[in-house]
Amino acid sequence: MSDGLVAAIWRSYRSPRGVMADRMASGLTESGAQRDLWIACGLFFVASAPNAVRQAQALDIDDPVSGAVAAHLFGFIFVAPLLFYLLAAVLHLIARAFGGTGGFRAARVALFWTALLGGPLAIVVSVAGVLGEIAAGPDFAALAGYLSILAFAYWLWLLANATAEAEGFRDARRVVLVLGAACVGIWALLGTAIAAGAG
């Protein structure tokens, strides 16, 4: 990553809407959005590696670690980008239903840029989890879970501000509420589906 990109990421943690406005003013390019997405997926792969290795070690198969790392690599290189493109389209359609004026490309730029902002957060949470487990053992898992929830909530705030700017909303608080409600709804649906499958 160039110094300019690192500086923009750092500034986005304090002023996500301002940085998104600067990016829109400089022109929204598909190649720039894809660059952000590829870097984000790479960072998420790195962040997921310790957990993948930990889970793989419990499997009773030959060379489980290599298999787990390969599976995660495939997921983040081939599957995750497609899911992000789909999520960006859904995000724009929801924003348009609430009066958003941005286009599909603006939604992709906002989401992919915010995904890039989430990469370092995921790595910090991952490293904290590994160090906490080394220092405190498995009892640290609950605290690591709370840290993950806080990081995700902060990431939602970043996404809401970037989306508000990209879609022309004056107030990002409405976007935060809609995104939060959507996450709670999806969480509840997943919980219901898992409970039904287990029963």
Image (cartoon, grey):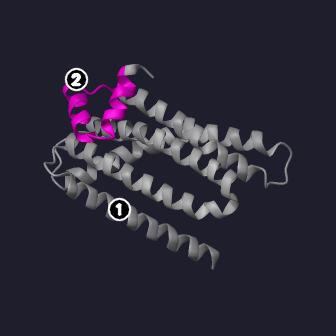
Q: Say what secondary structure mark 2 lies in.
A: loop
Q: Is residue 31 visible?
A: no
Q: Which residue is mark 2?
A: 26
Of residues 111 and 22, the one drawn nearer to the viewer in this rendering: 22
**Image quadrant assignment for residue 7:** top left
Relative to 69, is 155 on the left or the right? Answer: left
**Which tag is nearer the camera, tag 1 or tag 2?**
2
Q: Percent position (x, y) of residue 146? A: 50, 61
Q: Residue at x 43, y 57 (%)?
A: 150
Q: Percent position (x, y) of residue 103? A: 23, 39
Disc 1, disc 2: CB below 8 Å? no
Q: Is residue 156 magenta?
A: no
Q: What is the magenta segment's predominant secondary structure?
A: helix
Relative to 136, is 64 on the left or the right? Answer: right
Q: Residue at x 38, y 49 (%)?
A: 155
Does label 1 or label 2 sit earlier along the sequence? 2
Q: Which residue is mark 1?
A: 182
The extreme bottom residue here reads 199
Relative to 33, is 62 on the left or the right? Answer: right
Q: Percent position (x, y) of residue 173? A: 21, 56
Amino acid type at circle 1 is Ala
Chain part drawn in magenta: 4-32
Amino acid type at circle 2 is Ser
Q: Say what secondary structure mark 1 lies in.
A: helix
116 above or below 135? above
168 above or below 28? below
Badge 2 crowding class, 10 Å Cα cut-off, few under 14, some 14 to 19, many 20 or more, is few
Of residues 179 and 17, the one drawn nearer to the viewer in this rendering: 17
